[in-house]
Amino acid sequence: MLARMLFTLLNRLQVVEKLAESRPIRRAAQITAYALTKAQLAGQDASKRVMRSQTFRQVREETGRVPGDLQDVGNRLRRVRKTFVDEVKEGWKDGSRQIKK
């Protein structure tokens, strides 16, 4: 019964308009819009970094080649791993520097 009353109340245009004009609802909408914008910008920044990433380029290049033997595959994987580890370390240092600022 309570759910039905709440549903009926929220389906009235005047009630929805009053709620939309209230300060808490407006503030919640502002905070939500801010969080979505920040998340979108962070996602764009992360995707740009991935596209510039040496590891990404190297993986794309390595997957395009046909391996000669098992040792060749192992060497390729070692190179990709080393590049990945180096980029993670560099990203960690960059993050630490940004936090210190």
Image (cartoon, rainbow, N blue to C red):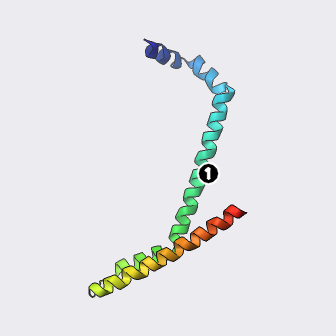
Q: Is residue 39 above or below residue 93?
A: above
User: Residue lying furthest left in this view?
Assistant: 69
Q: Residues within 10 Å of mark 1 (few under 14, many from 20)?
A: few
Residue at 59%, 18% (x, y): give it.
15
Q: Position of residue 65 (x, y in %)?
A: 34, 83
Q: Quadrant of the N terminus?
A: top left
In percent of width and height, residue 60 lies at: 41, 76
Relative to 5, does residue 46 appear above or below in the rendering?
below
Q: Amino acid at mark 1?
A: Lys
Q: Which residue is mark 1?
A: 38
Taking the spot 37% from the left edge, 82% from the top edge, the residue there is 76
Residue 46 seen in this snapshot: yes
Q: Is residue 63 above or below residue 49?
A: below
Q: Position of residue 57 (x, y in %)?
A: 46, 76
Query: Which secondary structure, mark 1?
Result: helix
Q: How many marks?
A: 1
Residue 52 seen by the camera: no
Q: Nearer the viewer, residue 37 or 13?
A: 37
Question: Which image quadrant is residue 69 in?
Answer: bottom left
Lateral position of residue 90 relative to residue 57, left or right? right
Residue at the (46%, 13%) spot, across then down: 2
Q: In this view of the protein, which residue sits in the foreground, 5 or 13?
A: 5
Residue 16's x, y, as percent?
Answer: 58, 22
Q: Residue at x 60, y 17 (%)?
A: 14
Quadrant in the picture for the C terminus:
bottom right
